[in-house]
Amino acid sequence: VIALVDYGAGNLTSVRKALAAVGAQVWTPSVPGELGRAHGIVVPGVGHFDATRQITEDWRTAIKTVADDGVPLLGICVGLQWLFQGSEEAITTDGICLFKGTCFRFTERVNERLKVPHVGWNSLRMPKPSRLMAGVDNDTQVYFTHSYAAPVIDDTVAICEYGVPFSAAVERDNIAAVQFHPEKSGDAGLRILANWSELVRRSSERSGGAKADVK
Amino acid sequence: MLSKRIIACLDVRDGKVVKGVNFEGLRDAGDPAGLAQRYNRDGIDEIVILDVTATLEARQARANTIAAVARQIFLPLTVGGGIRNEDDAAAAIDAGADKVSLNTAALENPPLISALAKRYGSQAVIVAIDAKREGDGFAVFARSGTSAAHRNAIEWAKEAAAMGAGEILLTSIDRDGTKAGFDCELTAAVSDAVNIPVIASGGAGTFDHFAEVFTTGHADAALAASIFHFNEQSVSELKQFLAERAIPVRK
């Protein structure tokens, strides 16, 4: 089963619905200790990086502990940015530093006139094969809505360009994240969620299924 | 490259699509979820549900409509019409809307824009502006175009953006329903004045009109209702037409 972390930033209806559409079982844990039961964790997000401040220390610790145990973790939108070191959007709010780099505002990096937020369907380029983006072709378009972006790093598995190249998807071992909204990206988005859901299934089979609460 | 978006608008009342639905092979032509699904298959980029009824009972009907559409499609979904306050917006978003579109309520109570942007993020807040040519400028109208707001459309768009709106949905009252083409002058004036995306609406009659509004009109997206309802031409044909003219669209 997949834990969908609800830290009060926007609604989770769409993500829950899309995961259900690819056959995943989802629940929203009410206390951090429940995360120990998760075979996969989704950190969603819309809006402002500062909203991730609502992920309190006990949740951060629990998420990190479970991820360190090898449980698949998926960040979406601001959830991706949170997996980096931080964001210029809220310099006093720290990410959990699973990926290296700081998220930047488009208008700070691009000289030409750009409308921000970056809203709409934009195309992806895959610099290397990954499990998350398996079966998704170059030039596939997905739906973005964001004003800040993560830099392209070694772990970047999909690149998008909006005045400047940025990480549309990252993956390293059991940690993955997407800047776009797979739950709003039609068939391509569902494919990516199905890929990730399959990773969760395989990972849970390896770990033997049974799970207990963490302290 | 960022695509120009094609958005279909469903005008809904009491759970039924009320404007210009003329699809063959659709069991219930007035069923918003069925229509949304059809548009989805045809390659639409977003759906807007415009629900003009705003009574308390209607809010529940609207929630049911939103939920029914949201169950069927995995595309961005906007709900507008009768969003008067934070509770209305919350009800729409809880039912499955990704964005709400504010019109009269934003004019009467601009801080509502910032309140919703703070609560849900700017990307969830669209300010809809109904504008009409008046002298050299464009005047804003409230209450479905019936009441002068005594505001200049460009100034109001700038103010809405500054208060945290994530997009502007700009409708030309002069062109709405005429099929004479979008008001490209209005659209360009607003689009150039704000740094957020502008969705053009009102007047779509031919594929050329879309090409015009994306080039000379500087629109980031275009919304239409009846052209998709009545025409035998489809969204996918429109996109093909635009792609042939080097306008970036999602295939």
Image (spheres, rainbow, N blue to C red):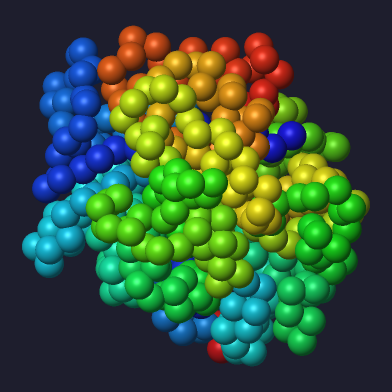
Quick one: which residue is furthest to the left in this view? B57
Left or right: where B205 falls relative to A59: left
> On the image, which quarter does residue A84 sit in?
bottom right
Q: Position of residue B80 (x, y in %)?
A: 33, 54
Q: Position of residue A116 (x, y in %)?
A: 69, 56
Q: Residue at x 56, y 41 (%)?
A: B187
Residue A207 is at least partly visible in this image: no
Q: Residue at x 56, y 33 (%)?
A: B184
> On the image, which quarter does residue A11 sit in?
bottom left
Left or right: where B215 falls relative to B44: right
Q: Is residue A139 above or below residue B133?
A: above
Q: Nearer the viewer, residue B153 or A188?
A: B153
Q: Nearer the viewer, residue B125 or A158?
A: B125
Q: Residue at x 40, y 68 (%)?
A: B106
Q: Residue at x 59, y 22 (%)?
A: B211
Residue B150 is at least partly visible in this image: yes
In the rendered picture of this protein, how many numbered marks are placed on residues? 0
Q: Is residue B248 above or below residue A108?
A: above
